[in-house]
Amino acid sequence: MHGFANPARFLRLARWLMPALLVPGLVLSLGALAWGLALAPPDHLMGVTVKILFIHVPCVWLGMAGWSTIAISSIAELVWRHPLAGIAARAAAVPGAVFTALGLITGSIWGRPTWGTWWVWDGRLTSFLILLFLYFGYIALSDAAQRDAGAGGPGAGGAGRVAAIFGLVGAINIPIINRSVVWWNSLHQPPSITMGKSAIDGTYLWPLLIAALGFSLVFGGVVLARMRMLLAEIQTEARLRRKALG
Amino acid sequence: MPRALIKPKHQRLVLVLLALAALIGAGLLAAWALSRQASYFYIPSDLVARPPEQGRAVRLGGMVEKGSLKTMPDGVTIHFTVTDGKAEVPVRFSGITPDLFVEGSGVVAEGRMDGRSFVADNLLAKHDEKYVPREMKDMSAAQAKQVVAQTK
């Protein structure tokens, strides 16, 4: 892993890996969504509204995967001081927050016709809203730490240490979201897919899994794009500072 | 073991792992302490075993018992029974029900206890985790398998 501690080496890899993830990701996502919308049959209870499944479920999965990325990168930053770990965590925060917001919006739109309400304060919905707020907190904190480091302030050197601790502490919400429908009575139904078993019929499951794969590839591509951008930003700032001093 | 022999990297790893263990412990404790308060509704057994005071706003959740749904002559008032398999509570409601409200399906009723029955102000439909196409719902398992095999 420390082979990529050299940003130039990482950037060479990222340059071709980014489109290699984004292009098939977009093709798979759009294909699976078209398949789901056009071909999947109506559900026995909820009718055609079942088709929101194909966008809602991949979005919430990636919302949680985004924070898992932040948590793992935070461990790598705190323990191994890997120079790219903090950048990976910051890069994952924005797309993670976008998927989380999309998950909340599509869930709300789905809730109105099926449950009869846009929103309830049950365990699942509340813990997922908290995830969105955690993202906002993380983005604000890591940006502030980066600015502080750039200005040579007290955060210099250990920039993002605070953000990494926040990323790690916030990870406790992920198992809570996952278990919320099991621990507490909630309006949201229990998990459909558990340990290799699925209560979702194959006609829905296949487009769902392909959409999830496509969304994940897009997420990976966006994270790489943002890492390149953040690295370029840091380089430019360092160059400007050297010029100002010289 | 003298301190100098422990690499700082390993020391940090142990610290992070300890912090993680403490964090997970705290999270589990909090979740366990919240187990009653964080529930969105009471199930019929709860309401029968520990009835809340009359008139206090509570939510009742469970299955609408098959064959229990009756529409009153005024056309908007319905009576039905909510069950969790162990206890049942009769429910009264006037108004528009959600589309997914049917017998044998889940429901969450917002309202209050009135004597031994429950008066609901609002009904929410709670569906299960199964997603099955309409055409296959009424087929036998063997028929469904055949259809799936044909479409593969």
Image (spheres, coloured by chain):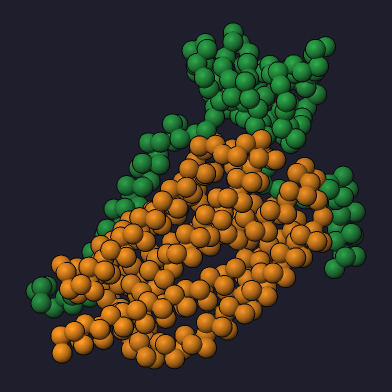
Chain colours: A orange, B green
For the N terminus of chain A, give its image quadrant. Answer: bottom left
* Residue at figure coordinates x 39%, y 73% from the top left: A88
Q: List x then y, in percent, for residue A236.
A: 31, 83
Position of residue B68 measured from the top left corner of the image (x, y, whole percent) = 77, 21
Looking at the image, which is closer to me, A134 or A184? A134
Number of numbered discs: 0
Q: Is residue A47 left or right of residue A217?
A: right
**Relative to residue A131, is residue B56 depicted above or below?**
above
Taking the image as shown, residue A147 lies to the left or right of residue B107, namely left
Q: Position of residue B84 (x, y in %)?
A: 64, 29
Above or below for B103 versus A11: above
Whether residue A3 can be seen here: no
Any part of residue A167 in sight:
yes
At a point 29% along the width and 53% down the height, the residue shown is B22
Residue found 26% across the figure and 60% down from its top: B18
Which residue occupies the extreme front position in the image?
Answer: A244
- Which quadrant of the view contains residue B78? top right
Observer-nearest residue: A50 or B16?
Answer: A50
- Residue A144 as seen in the image, left or right of residue B56: left
- Which is nearer the eye, A136 or A198? A136
Quadrant housing the C terminus of chain A: bottom left
On screen, B91 above or below B145?
A: above
Quarter of the figure with residue B85: top right
Towards the viewer: B117 or A219: A219
- Residue in the picture at 26% in, 86% down: A239
Which corner quadrant of the image does residue A240 belong to?
A: bottom left
Q: In the image, is residue A108 above or below residue B123?
A: below
Percent from the top left, x then y, of residue B116? 61, 11
